[in-house]
Image (cartoon, rainbow, N blue to C red):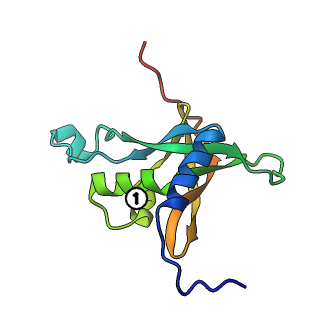
């Protein structure tokens, strides 16, 4: 058993997580966020037109299928591992109080143009400092696909 009473956190875990996420097929995932500025047009305020969403990129990240047995007719589950550095940058950019708030605000995660719904989040930490976030995702039942600009 190690004595951790004299250990202090430094950025080694953050740098290691970034390197591992990049080395294991690092990709960029985006959170689908509500617009930062309220829409001021009359149809939008009345709910006639749907509000747009903004994509908030998070990188490095690793996206992979969860190896759980999936019941017939149930959507597949995936996990997204995201660097804490990327999440902290997003929190600062949006001036939020925590990662929980960030993930609660997100309508989903967009990976390779496909929408996934966030079911659960968890953290990996060392000495009380978070170095990676894990998001459990499932495919959106709507089959929503981001259209690329041609």
Q: Position of residue 125 (x, y in %)?
A: 56, 69
In this picture, residue 78 sits left or right of residue 12: right
Q: Does residue 140 show up? A: no
Q: Residue at x 62, y 47 (%)?
A: 20
Rendered-image quadrant of the N terminus: bottom right
Provide the residue designation for mark 1.
Answer: 102
Outermost top residue: 150
Instruction: Count up the numbered dots.
Output: 1
Rendered-image quadrant of the C terminus: top left
Using the image as rendered, state which of residue 87 and residue 33 is in the foreground: 87
Using the image as rendered, state which of residue 50 and residue 128 is in the foreground: 128
In this picture, residue 24 sits left or right of residue 47: right
Q: Does residue 59 show up? A: yes
In this picture, residue 85 sits left or right of residue 2: left
Q: Position of residue 149 (x, y in %)?
A: 41, 17
In this picture, residue 59 sits left or right of residue 16: left
Q: Position of residue 120 (x, y in %)?
A: 59, 62
Q: Quadrant of residue 57?
A: top left
Using the image as rendered, state which of residue 29 and residue 86 is in the foreground: 86
Q: Residue at x 59, y 51 (%)?
A: 81
Q: Relative to residue 111, is residue 73 depicted above or below?
A: below
Q: Quadrant of residue 97?
A: bottom left
Q: Secondary structure at mark 1?
A: helix
Q: Position of residue 128 (x, y in %)?
A: 51, 76
Q: Residue at x 30, y 37 (%)?
A: 49
Q: Residues within 10 Å of mark 1 (few under 14, many from 20)?
A: some
Q: Relative to residue 55, is residue 4 depicted above or below?
A: below
């Amino acid at each position: 058993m190690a004595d951790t009473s004299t250990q202090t956190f430094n950025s080694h875990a953050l740098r290691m997580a970034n390197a591992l996420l990049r080395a294991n097929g690092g990709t960029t995932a985006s959170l689908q966020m509500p617009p930062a500025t309220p829409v001021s047009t009359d149809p939008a305020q009345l709910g006639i037109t749907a509000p747009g969403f903004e994509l908030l990129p998070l990188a490095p990240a690793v996206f992979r299928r969860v190896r759980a047995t999936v019941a017939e007719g149930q959507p597949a589950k995936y996990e997204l591992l995201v660097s804490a550095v990327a999440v902290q940058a997003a929190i600062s950019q949006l001036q939020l109080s925590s990662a929980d708030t960030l993930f609660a605000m997100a309508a989903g995660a967009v990976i390779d143009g496909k929408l996934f719904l966030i079911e659960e989040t968890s953290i990996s930490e060392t000495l009380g400092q978070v170095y990676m976030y894990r998001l459990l995702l499932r495919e959106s039942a709507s089959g929503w696909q981001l259209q690329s600009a041609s």
